[in-house]
Image: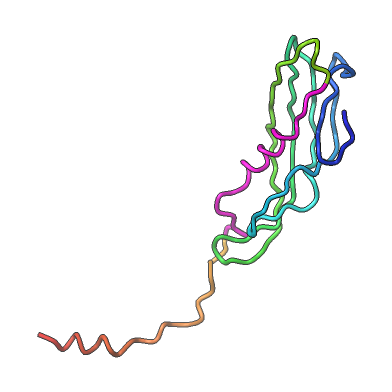
């Protein structure tokens, strides 16, 4: 496996035939999004194994994010987890390395909630009090 901090590459030629566990962190998510800010890298615990002419990779991914609650608008931290990461890569004799970076990144991004909430019981934006009645509409009640 390559040690670059921004890529997750499996060296297929040196992989144990029984499979190997890959554990670490890769900095592969850099979003230009004001409401979704990753911090740290994607932590992974994967098993890579050559099965016939395929490299089978499965395991667990997680990434910490600073998100904005879709109900109240406040920032909160959350850990996005992918417990069922599974990818298969076609390999041949002339393939010595397989780059997992794009698939790891995509799996984490797809696991992000569409409408993140800081907590299930979040009431939403706090109302500052009852809206005062608009007396101008009362004149319409008197029309016949």
Name the residue: 69% across, 25% down: 87
23 lies above or below 50 = below
Q: Is residue 28 left or right of residue 131?
A: right
Closer-to-camera residue (83/100)? 100
Q: Quadrant of residue 13?
A: top right
Vertical position of residue 60 compared to residue 121: above or below:
above
Quadrant for residue 144, please give it: bottom left
The location of residue 35, given as percent across then percent down, is 63, 58
Task: Write the residue at 18% across / 85% down.
Answer: 141
Residue farthest to the front, as pictured: 94
| Picture colour scheme | rainbow
Q: Is residue 112 magenta?
A: yes
What residue is at 58 percent from the left and 57 percent from the top? Answer: 120
> Residue at (85%, 34%) from the top-left corner?
23
- Camera-side residue: 23 or 102? 102
Q: Quadrant of the N terminus?
A: top right
On the image, the x and y values in percent for residue 34 come to 64, 59
- Residue 41, x across and y down, in percent: 80, 46
In-image side of 132 versus 25 (left or right):
left
In this rendering, the count of numbered labels is 0
Using the rendered view, name the quadrant where residue 84 is placed: top right
In the figure, 69 relative to 140: above or below?
Answer: above
Q: Which residues are magenta?
A: 97-120
Q: Position of residue 62 (x, y in %)?
A: 74, 43
The question of residue 45 being in magenta is answered with no
Is residue 16 shown above or below 72? Answer: above
């Amino acid at each position: 496996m390559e040690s670059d901090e921004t890529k997750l590459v499996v060296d297929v030629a040196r992989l144990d035939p029984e499979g190997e566990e890959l554990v670490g962190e890769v900095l592969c998510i850099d979003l230009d999004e004001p409401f979704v800010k990753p911090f740290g890298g994607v932590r992974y615990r994967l098993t890579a194994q050559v099965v016939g002419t395929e490299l089978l990779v499965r395991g667990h991914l997680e990434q910490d994010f600073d998100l904005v609650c879709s109900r109240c608008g406040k920032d909160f931290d959350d850990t996005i987890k992918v417990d069922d990461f599974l990818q298969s890569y076609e390999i041949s004799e002339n393939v010595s390395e397989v780059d997992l970076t794009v698939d790891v990144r995509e799996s984490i991004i797809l696991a992000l909630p569409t409408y993140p909430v800081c907590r299930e019981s979040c009431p939403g934006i706090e109302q500052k009090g009852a809206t005062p009645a608009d007396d101008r509409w009362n004149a319409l009640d008197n029309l016949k």
